[in-house]
Amino acid sequence: MTELRILPLLGWPEVREGDDLAERVASSAELEDGDIVVLAQKVVSKAEGRVVRLDDVEPSERARELAGDEDPRRIEAILQESVRVVRSRPPLVIAETRHGFICASAGVDSSNAPEEGTIVLLPVDPDASAARVRERLRDLTGRTVGVVVSDSFGRPWRAGTTDVALGAAGIRPLLDLAGQRDRAGYELRHTQIAVADEIAGAAELVMGKMDGIPGAVLRGLDLAGEGTAQELVITPERDLFR
Amino acid sequence: MTELRILPLLGWPEVREGDDLAERVASSAELEDGDIVVLAQKVVSKAEGRVVRLDDVEPSERARELAGDEDPRRIEAILQESVRVVRSRPPLVIAETRHGFICASAGVDSSNAPEEGTIVLLPVDPDASAARVRERLRDLTGRTVGVVVSDSFGRPWRAGTTDVALGAAGIRPLLDLAGQRDRAGYELRHTQIAVADEIAGAAELVMGKMDGIPGAVLRGLDLAGEGTAQELVITPERDLFR
């Protein structure tokens, strides 16, 4: 590889339920085989109709407790997306989602929502979302690409968020160096690189939350393969950092 | 911005103590103002002589306990680099370093070490390392660039490692969106993006552990400013994820 290029997807109007994201990608980028298309979770969720009106949410007692001075309906929506509350400090909630993601507000977000009084949930199955966009891009363009659905997550011990891969299709999400050797002949044991997360973070650098850039295309990586972002969700028994 | 380019630094011979890394960067890349140079911690540590011979390490009782079947001298070197053991499962140790980083083996690594029987420690002050390379690059090339020193860290809840910024100079490591508004006018509260970590991860995508590529140049980002990677180390009282 000589160079990695990251091209922002530009000129998209607001995404609404039912919009064909692959069509938008195809008309805003000249795709090549092997490209990796990164789409912000927010646009995927909006296209899939994962939007809730706060007026339709009835807050539970628990939601009222966790909400502090904030809207308990928003907290209720978070609880409904969660299998477990990991930490809370009203009105902040870190929760585990049904997908196994541990993140602020179970990924529920009111910024960049389609209209006032609505909130956006994570896709039901982000790997399936990525796979659908990938297949549709192949139909539309004839190109075989990878697709990653990304979102901004906080993490323990370090300030700020980095984008990670919630969904993936057509790429190897983990690059396994086990059995490979360094220049001195030492085996690089235990080393798996979460390239899908690095791809999501790299795309975030050109996306920028304010400009409404919905995604990016990475060109120059050789990571085509089969895999899902679910592989990045670590099982507790394997997680020495937990 | 139209495009982010990430160019690997190629053709470096093995780095030894006292080597001038800025000179190597300058001769393997045609730098431009605003570029961000990412260097792998390993080459920075080697140039700074942060290499220890295992024969010079006397293992303590605690090191023997934590080592399991592995070399207790390596564990002793890890303990000497640590202020606190966060988790352990012999022979694996997650530790907090003097810098406040929480990572496997306190960053001590035997892969890619200069010779058999040696291990490589993290730089004493990676922000200072980055600042020195930056100043020297300005002297050599007349260019004003950012510099990031990166390393691969594991993290809770997610499989694999991603590269993060251990040191930084000449860039804003956190992009603060507080007070900014989205298209609907909602304030993007609480949102700080750890761009220095995303930069480190993006560079890792072209570095590849096996090829011995020691770093990369990112071109096209507008992140020049003052800041250090120490800002990415979160204080416990602000860390809801901890």
Image (cartoon, coloured by chain):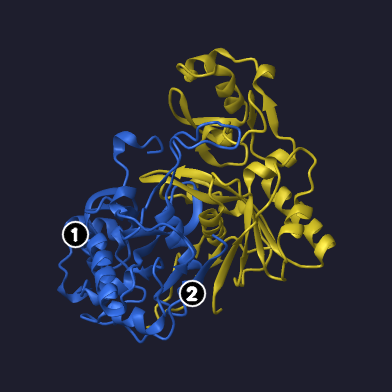
Chain colours: A blue, B yellow
Figure check: A38 above or below A92: below
Q: Residue at x 39, y 34 (%)?
A: A240
Number of residues whose C-alpha sits closer than 10 Å to that of mark 2, classed few (under 14), some (14–19) or many (20 or more): many
What is the chain letter for disc 2?
A: A
Q: What residue would you read off at disc 1?
A: A80
Above or below, B28 relative to A71: above
Say the numbered circle drawn on residue B94: none
The x, y position of residue B61, in whole percent, is: 55, 12
Which residue was labeled with disc 2?
A7
**Dot 2: what SS?**
strand
Q: Amino acid at mark 1?
A: Gln
Both marks 2 and 1 on one chain? yes
**SS assignment at label 1:** helix
Say if B132 sits above or below B80 in the image: below
Tag 1: Cα neighbours inside 10 Å, few (<14), some, or many (≥20)? some
- Pick the residue in front: B105 or B115: B115
- Could you tell whether B209 is left or right of B52 in the image? left
Residue closest to the far right: B139
Residue A70 placement, left or right of A56? right
Residue A93 visible in image: no
Q: Position of residue A209 (x, y in %)?
A: 45, 73
User: Farthest top residue?
Assistant: B61
Question: Residue A195 location in percent, x, y?
Answer: 43, 53
* Quarter holding residue B216: bottom right
